Image: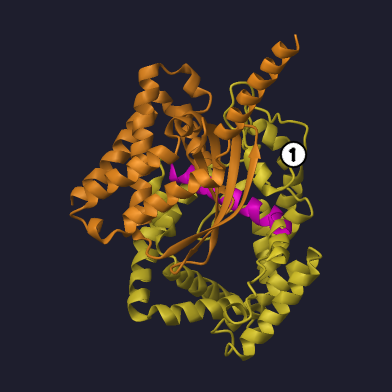
Chain colours: A orange, B yellow
Amino acid sequence: MIRKRLVFLLVYFVIFCAHVAVASSSPTDSLRPTLEGVIDVIRDPNLAGVDHKKVRREKVMAIATRGFDFTEMSKRALGATWRDLSQEERQYFEELFTKLLENAYIGKLEGYSGQEIVYQDERIKGNRAAVATIVKSSDTAPFSVSYVMLQSGSDWLVYDLNIEGVSFLRNYSEQFKSILRKDKFAGLVKILEEKNETFEKEESN
Amino acid sequence: MYPKIIILFTLLLLLCCSFGCSQKGSAVAFQDVVIEDDEVPVDKMDMLLNDDFFDEEKVVEQIYYDPLEPMNRVFFEFNDKLYYWFLSPLNTAYTAILPWDIRFSIGNFVNNLAAPIRLVNNLLQLKIKDAGVEISRFLINSTLGVFGFGDPAMLDFGLAPREEDFGQTLGYWGVGEGVYLCVPIIGPSNVRDLVGFTADAYTHPMVYYIDELYVSAGYYAGSRVNLLSLNPEVYEDLKKYSLDPYVSMRQVYLEYRRKKIDDNPMQRRSDNEL
């Protein structure tokens, strides 16, 4: 009986410790390599310039895909509509939305020269976490960026950015809602496709 | 002076109406209702985590009140045209004529001259320490900073401006935002902030220095062009990244203002911690 209990206790401890080990990576630890990785690629002189644009963006996106949860983003941005979509529609939407973010924001990041990220604080609540940072750049006054993250296995993945109190995801979510009300999902897809095309046209010029 | 007072009263009247709207309007604006845990958010960071705008069970709705959307969209288009046809070319010329350093100094000067607005509003919000910082900043920058063209208070003394305006003061004391407005020339606002904007004009020294509307208007326009020249890409980025720029701008404006109103305790706390 006692042995049985001991075994049970042992098993319990092993599971418990394993759980602790799995969850041991802090949100900041998960975030840091993603942000640093992206900055390193953008600053890499070997990848600079228009000629290396394709390679550079692929590298940035490879890092971003590991640190950001684009599925969660798409799901939250669409809200209730997500539930009514088929698997293919969800996948296609995620593809379009990710492409838009890639087009819009990597270009913006590439424009920044020197910037430093100061990690300020982190909070965990259930399976979600927020990491507060301050971005110090030579071009602008320092501004706050908070990353909202979701736990995924032993890692934390970003699904929202909050810049000076303005939620990036909420912004898209409200725009989508406004478009969905009028044009439904098909209309939204069309607008997204067109938006992505304008970026590609601009780039080929 | 008369028309100004009439405008102020009209706005105050609108504001009084908006007391009711801001409570009721939010419920009308959307069918979805805010449902949250009964725990009280500790501070802004925890607020981020309470932000369940997608959840299988419960939907938390962003609250805004925009019953004038059709009209606002017309003015948004107007401002958009104003920007591309007039402001943007003007800005290009302005930027070409004046180097960045000078435009930056003009920006400092404009900011320094608006110090009374920040001082009054810090006092109205009982932020005595911040009011003291504003006084120090004004004294340092007006002397060492040569009439405010430099900002040694920030660079040498590490005193950041304590941005407060009357719209924030009203918000601090619990006045609702009222109807969202996209105002021609001025841009995104709401009833509360428009009242604040008008009231702040009375604490600006410019009004007492030269009591001519066109001088004030000219000063305002000039300072806006200068501000634009320092941050040229803000509006164009917004247009570029969004699918519905009107909605995007409304969202940015409302969230940014809300943060400015209720994030101040946090800002002061982090100042103390540092």
Relative height, residue B258 to residue B20 (above, below):
below
Residue A14, image x, y percentages: 61, 25
Please tell me which residue is depicted at 40% across the width and 60% down the height of the picture: B233
Please tell me which residue is depicted at 64% across the width and 40% down the height of the picture: A124
Residue B138, image x, y percentages: 67, 82
Seen from the viewer's position, the closer of residues A44 and B182 is: A44
Residue B119, image x, y percentages: 73, 73
Find the magenta span and give its range. B244-265
In the displayed orientation, state which residue is furthest to the top. Answer: A1
Can the viewer see residue B10?
Answer: no
The crowding category of the residue bearing disc 1, from other C-alpha atoms within 10 Å (few below 14, some 14 to 19, many at least 20), is some
Q: Is residue A129 magenta?
A: no
Residue A126, image x, y percentages: 65, 32
- In the picture, the quarter occupied by the N terminus of chain B is bottom right
Q: Is residue A103 left or right of residue A145?
A: left
Q: Which residue is mark 1?
A: B23
Seen from the viewer's position, the closer of residues A79 and B70 is: A79
Mark 1: amino acid: Gln
